Image: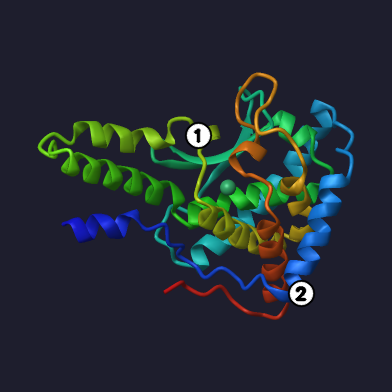
């Protein structure tokens, strides 16, 4: 049983991450530095932001669903994508609501984007968390961790606390911080989805590379808080785009 629990604790990705060395790493360093030095784009009006969302959302939904079905992941590929009207911070997230997979993005985030490519990449990245089964995996890891902790403390007889902890993972959806490997896997999947939808994932990834505060004015996490800017993320997008253009498909990780 312990071996089984330890297996659940591993943070392995479902798909192979691309090799980000050499030329990709140099190009990523340049692009990353450029994105961090550029001034933030002019803030869009709420009306213009909603128009941008209305243009991008159906294309990402279609491309995401096709990618999800092709990979035969067994997950429910019919995601409900909408604007979260309550959220004040510039953030976006993927979660399950009564068993239904949902992607939410805040209006302030869309208002702060510099192009349709950026909104497309954010939504496609969140779709990657569904295909990578990151919510389920993270819940299992928390549950397994709590059970092991309970076993070590000699209180494994009552696992209700552990289950409560596992169930709580999805609760603060905008504040979920995944492991770096899951974020990179979402970037790989998101690059493929954004590209299939006709957007430029490299242009889109500039958004995540920006130098912005981890928390917003009202104290909640921004997307830079849950997705710390990292050069490896840009390199992963560049390497994945090169794979797509070289007709190299996604491979399952061993
Ligand atoms: Zn993410």
Can residue 151 be seen in the rendering of this structure? yes
Q: Residues within 10 Å of mark 2 (few under 14, many from 20)?
A: few
Q: Tell me the quarter of the image containing the C terminus.
A: bottom left
Question: Could you say which disc has been placed on residue 23 in the image?
Answer: 2
**Which sits in the foreground, 225 or 99?**
225
Q: Secondary structure at mark 1?
A: helix
Q: Which of the two discs, 2 and 1, labels the residue nearer the N terminus? A: 2
Quote the CA–CA distance across marks 2 and 1.
Answer: 36 Å
Can residue 196 be seen in the rendering of this structure? no
Q: Is residue 24 left or right of residue 7?
A: right
Residue 249 locus on image (x, y percent): 59, 76
Quarter of the view holding residue 242: bottom right
Q: Residue at x 70, y 57 (%)?
A: 231
**Which sits in the foreground, 186 or 106?**
186
Some atom of ligand 1 lies within 8 Å of the CB belonging to the residue at label 2: no
Look at the numbered discs 2 and 1 and tell me whether their residues touch, using CB distance below 8 Å: no
**Can you identify the residue that label 1 sits on?**
173
Q: Secondary structure at mark 2?
A: helix
Q: Residues within 10 Å of mark 1 (few under 14, many from 20)?
A: some
Q: Residue at x 43, y 36 (%)?
A: 170
Q: Residue at x 51, y 68 (%)?
A: 70
């Amino acid at each position: 049983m312990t071996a089984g629990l330890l297996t659940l604790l591993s943070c392995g990705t479902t798909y192979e991450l691309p090799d980000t060395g050499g030329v990709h790493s140099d190009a990523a360093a340049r692009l990353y530095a450029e994105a961090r030095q550029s001034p933030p784009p002019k803030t869009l009006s709420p009306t213009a932001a909603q128009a941008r969302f209305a243009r991008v959302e159906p294309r990402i939904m279609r491309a995401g669903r096709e990618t999800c079905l092709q990979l035969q992941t067994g997950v429910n590929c019919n995601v409900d994508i909408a604007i979260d009207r309550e959220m004040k911070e510039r953030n976006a997230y993927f979660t399950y609501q009564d068993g239904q997979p949902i992607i939410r993005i805040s209006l302030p985030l869309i208002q702060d984007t510099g192009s349709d490519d950026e909104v497309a990449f954010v939504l496609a990245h969140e779709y990657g968390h569904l295909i990578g089964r990151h919510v389920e995996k993270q819940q299992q890891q928390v549950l397994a961790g709590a059970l092991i902790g309970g076993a070590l403390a000699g209180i494994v007889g009552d696992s209700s606390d552990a289950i409560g902890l596992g169930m709580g993972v999805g609760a603060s959806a905008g504040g979920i911080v995944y492991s770096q490997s899951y974020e990179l896997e979402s970037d790989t999947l998101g690059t493929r989805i954004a590209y299939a939808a006709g957007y430029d994932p490299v242009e889109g990834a500039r958004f995540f590379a920006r130098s912005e505060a981890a928390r917003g004015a009202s104290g909640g996490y921004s997307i830079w808080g849950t997705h710390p800017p990292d050069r490896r993320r840009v390199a992963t997008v560049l390497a994945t785009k090169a794979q797509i253009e070289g007709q190299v498909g996604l491979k399952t990780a061993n």
